[in-house]
Structure formats: C-alpha cells, structure tokens
Amino acid sequence: QVQLVESGGGLVQPGGSLRLSCAASGRYHSINDMAWYRQAPGKQRELVARITSGGRTSYADSKQGRFTISRDNAKNTVYLQMNSLKPEDTAVYSCYADYWISGGNWREAWGSGTQVTVSS
C-alpha cells in the first residue's frame, strides 16, 4: 500500500507563501492522480488542486492563480505552492493519491495532513 507524508505547513502572515510537499512510499505498481485537499474548522473537506500522472492540473476555482500544484514522478512527490495566502486559507491540508497495485487492483491513500495557519 501507499503511505503519504506531508510536510511544509506552518504559520505564515497574510500575503505570504508556503510550499507543501507530499512524498509517497510503499508497494504499488503505479500512482495515478495526486491531489491536495483542505479542511478548515467546522467546514467540509474540499479539493484544492489535482494533478494527473501526465502532469495535467485542475484547481478549485478560488485557488486558480494563487496556488500551483506540481509533481516529480521520479521522487513520487507532489507539491503545492501557495502564494498570496489569506486568513481563510487556514486549514489542515491533506495529500491524496490513487494508485494501482499488482493484480490490477485500484486503491486510494490519504496523508495525515499538515496544518497551515495564515495570521498576523
């Protein structure tokens, strides 16, 4: 199975930037899509951005332009560059991946999340 470990969260002032990383490890045949989700206190988890194994990206509308998702397939790592951060971006950011294991079986994996706090 795939294990996902996020890093890069923390406290940042409004207008600042952070870069999140998520490294995948474990036993699998190939990883398909990877994505970042976030969940703010009292709110439902929402998709931030998604990237395919071929590098095609998609974003939640409100994140387009400020957030950039990228991926290094050689390192099995996905990144989220966040610029012009706002207090409403405060949330736990979690990494997601779907992947294939031997025998043609499809699985999903989630990281445990990293806290991002935007505050002065």
Image: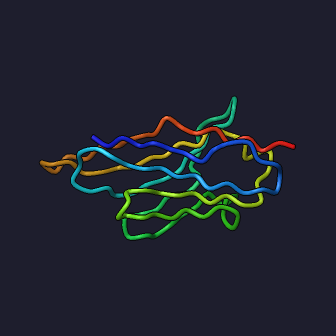
Residue at x-position 34% and y-position 58%:
32
Instruction: Out of 21 and 96, give the one closest to the viewer.
Output: 21
Residue at x-position 49% and y-position 46%:
95
* Numbered-mark total: 0
Residue 85 image position (x, y, % from top left): 76, 54
Instruction: Out of 6 and 48, give the one closest to the viewer.
Output: 6
Colour scheme of the picture: rainbow
In the current view of this chain or complex, which residue is farthest to the left?
Answer: 103
In the current view of this chain or complex, which residue is farthest to the top?
Answer: 42
**Above or below: residue 44 compared with residue 70:** above
Q: In this view, does 35 lie to the left or right of 15?
A: left
Quadrant in which the C terminus appears: top right
In the current view of this chain or complex, which residue is farthest to the right?
Answer: 120
Residue 107 image position (x, y, % from top left): 29, 43
Q: In this view, does 15 lie to the left or right of 98?
A: right
Residue at x-position 76% and y-position 47%:
12
Q: Is residue 78 left or right of residue 114?
A: left
Residue 39 image position (x, y, % from top left): 62, 38
Residue at x-position 51% and y-position 44%:
6
Quadrant in which the N terminus appears: top left
Q: In this view, does 21 lie to the left or right of 41?
A: left
Instruction: Out of 92 and 22, give the one closest to the viewer.
Output: 22
**Above or below: residue 2 compared with residue 80:** above
Quarter location, residue 115: top right
Residue 10 image position (x, y, % from top left): 68, 42
**Above or below: residue 118 compared with residue 66:** above
